[in-house]
Amino acid sequence: MAEEITENDKRFRICVCIDGSDECYQSLKYAARMGGGVDADIVLLYVRPADQGLRSGGLEVSVARENMLKWGIELPGIKYLKKGLDILKELGVMSGDDWTEEYVHTDVDGTALGDNKIDYTNKNGKKIVLKLKVSANIASGILEQWEIGQYDIIILGASVRGGSMPRAFWDPAVAEKVAVHAPCSVLVARDLDIGHGHLICTDGSETSMNMVALDAELASRCNCPISLMSVALDVEGEEEAKENVAKAEKMLKDAGIKVKETIVRVGNPVDEIIEAGPDYSLIVLSESGKTGLQRFFMGSVAFKVLENAHNSVMIVR
């Protein structure tokens, strides 16, 4: 069985990419709300590029890794993961004293530190995992981690335009590469504010309707209100846009899910969605049916919104 897949493959699995930024910890708080149930596991992931130097204070690397979270040493990513763990405890995700702890080390060619993780498991089988992973680069490490864990959603921070943050998950190339190639849903977080709901954008296609159903389930996990939006290219298409949101609303109503509002706009879909987006916690879109390479070169509404939006965007698969 893969390294971190639990025996019950029906569990909801969230991977939160940690890089020490304020945005990553806001994302973690959102993940805590989404993954607060006993059926959900949360993995905190820090990817260390293979050529990144160690700062172990002169300690032997073997001692450092064996005491991954027990020493106050400055191994890359350790302090970020520890802060994430403290946040989950403060939020009550790790309440109670029934958590067992297991440390796992995996050798990786070309690095003394290797991959290291700590599994925390409670009596209900819920897992919180802290993972320090080595990879050729950050984006590849995140995608490799999906192969290990096969998550329902990956959450990572977006770039800060005009900022001076170090190259990490904040590098837009990382977020875009993960969003293009990950087999699961990807949430790219910008100023993620939990309480304002999901703006689900639909074009009425089968792929889009599947996305509506999938995100409605995600929204229900965090008690987030749902708004539906469709954009017509011109006034002639406005009636079809109205039908798109009406069809999606009926589907959700039949499933017992309440829709807060429906929105129809006329214009360029990318511009209209980006303009409406800041009123919500996140914009939700479906990808096209193209392969990752085709999506990269041909583009789509979803990926143009992802690149240019002012707030968080989730691409649902």
Image (cartoon, rainbow, N blue to C red):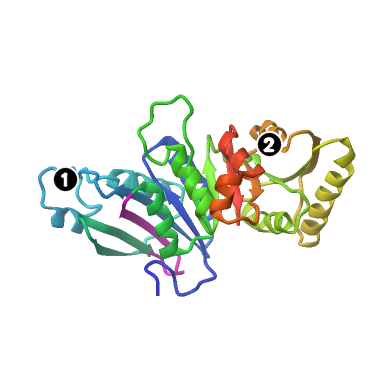
Could you say which is closer to the camera, residue 43 or residue 111?
111
Q: Amino acid at mark 2?
A: Val
What's the residue at 40%, 37% (across, down)?
A: 21
Rounded to the nearest angstrom, the CA distance separating label 1 from label 2 is 47 Å
Residue 304: x and y in percent read 61, 39
Could you say which is closer to the camera, residue 98 or residue 125?
125
First in sequence, mark 1 or 2: give its number. 1
- Residue segment shown in magenta: 121-136
Disc 2 packing (10 Å; few <14; some 14–19; many ≥20):
some
Q: Amino acid at mark 1?
A: Ser
| Residue 234 part of the magenta segment | no
In this orientation, does residue 48 appear? yes
Q: Which residue is mark 1?
A: 56
Disc 1 packing (10 Å; few <14; some 14–19; many ≥20):
some
| Residue 134 part of the magenta segment | yes
Q: Which disc is residue 270 wearing?
A: 2
What's the residue at 22%, 60% (across, down)?
A: 109
Q: Secondary structure at mark 2?
A: helix
